[in-house]
Amino acid sequence: MSVPDDALYGASTQRAVLNFPISGRPMPAAFVHGLGLVKIACARANEELGKLTPEKSRLIQQAAREVADGKLDCHFPVEVFQTGSGTSTNMNVNEVIANRVSQLAGGAIGSKKPVHPNDDVNLGQSSNDIIPTALHVSVALGLKNDLRPALAHLEAALAAKAQAFATIVKIGRTHLMDATPLTLGQEFSGYAAQVAKAIERIDRAILALRELAVGGTAVGTGINCHPEFAGKVIRILNGETGLEFIEALNHFEAQGARDDAVEVAGQLATIAASLTKIANDIRLLGSGPRSGLGEIRLPFTQPGSSIMPGKVNPVMSEMLVQVCIYTQGLSQMVVMCGRDGHFELNVTTPLIAYALHESIRVLANGARQFADACVEGLEADEARCRELVDRSLMLVTALNPHIGYDAAAAVAKEALGTGKSLREVVLGKGLMKAEDLDRALEPLSMTRPGESSLAAGG
């Protein structure tokens, strides 16, 4: 098998490159980095067990660290659509580490000296347990280090707007129809709370990935693996990552099924649904500038039309909605992959790795950009908010305790039919005194009815 002269990989990798010229998409770099961390832990564990000499272990760890740090990314050409166990990628990493060790030791690439890709780098391992282990480790790190901080950034931006808009009264909407008032700050506090819950979902997703398959080797029985190997590997990985992995409670489940990955996909799909709602609400609230709701003003980011001068579109919301649609499609793909665990092995793990890492990447980038280029620059149009509140007939809801539901409904109907204000109709019918009516129809008090009642009682 002819291998490029400058490549650190070997024959197994080159065969995979030739066998799978499908999409041109290599395995996610984050997944390869996670696999590098796993190889570090395996080498150190094998040294502790007396299976590797300290010198071999040191060299393997040094080369694997370069893999984990992304310094050798150009040497991982195997693409996503490959053997379903990920064996091609496992061997790609094994070969790169072995050949890099040869370089570090002053030897020739391909010599398999001083370490062998299978006998030393892959010692105590099978692709069938190590690839799922790398999947859990790399996805958990992506959730922790990339998506979680991005969502925290968006939550902070939304919470800041909730505080800034705290006293701006606007009309509420249910069923896309006028409802009772609330403040713009209260509305944005709901968005911030959605993102806070998304962060909690990230934490639950990381917990779902806690069990690692390492130690199961080929089919879950642990053949050719020292009984203490998995525990040592996991202890070392926990030190490397700051996470709290444990050995799989049942190795046959850990290799035959990918239910944990399906659960994570569900959390990501839920987060995408939350972000879609927020993005859509913000673009609707900012619609106009003269023929829409126009309660907030969106930042001008770029010209919106090639034919209509001066048009500015809610492009950041549109971007985020597309990101979320893409994520939900990827999540559904993981669900379908999860069904294909046949007997002792799920054979769609590379595609699961791609889908989860791609979802994390685009959600993190999308959330952060939306916060920076949209949310932080939002402004409230207080006059427009007040105008719509004053015109709304749903303020009549506050009159229910004073004149009853049926009378209030009649007032609203007459106001709509005649074009009169609620105040004019109520006073015309002699239903309430002017001072009591004005107090009841004060919009800000409707946004804090409990406080108003307490004040009145005091």
Image (cartoon, rainbow, N blue to C red):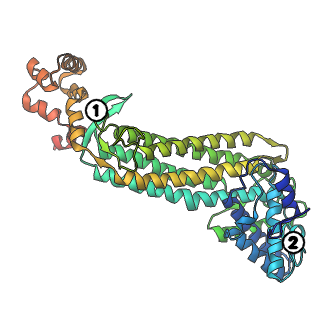
User: Callout 1, which amino acid?
Assistant: Thr
- Measuring from the top left, give residue 237's x and y in whole percent: 70, 68
Q: Is residue 171 above or below residue 404?
A: below
Q: Residue at x 71, y 73 (%)?
A: 65
- The reply to whether residue 234 is visible in this rendering is no
Q: Which image quadrant: the N terminus?
A: bottom right
Mark 2 = which residue? 120
- How dense is the environment of label 2, judged by Cα within 10 Å: few (below 14), some, or many (20 and up)? many
Figure label count: 2
Label 2 or label 1, whichever lies nearer to me, is 2
Q: Which element type, helix, strand or loop, lies under badge 1?
A: strand
Report the side of 166 relative to 127 (left or right): left
Report the side of 264 relative to 277 (left or right): right
- Measuring from the top left, give residue 299's x and y in whole percent: 35, 50
Q: Residue at x 17, y 17 (%)?
A: 418
- Measuring from the top left, give residue 158's x and y in whole percent: 38, 52
- How dense is the environment of label 1, judged by Cα within 10 Å: few (below 14), some, or many (20 and up)? many
Q: Which image quadrant: the C terminus?
A: top left
- The reply to whether residue 172 is visible in this rendering is yes
Question: Quick one: label 2 or label 1, which is nearer the N terminus?
Answer: 2
User: Callout 2, which amino acid?
Assistant: Asp
> Looking at this rendering, what residue extends furthest in the front direction?
307
Q: Is residue 241 above or below residue 312?
A: below
Q: Residue at x 81, y 52 (%)?
A: 85
Report the side of 182 relative to 439 (left or right): right
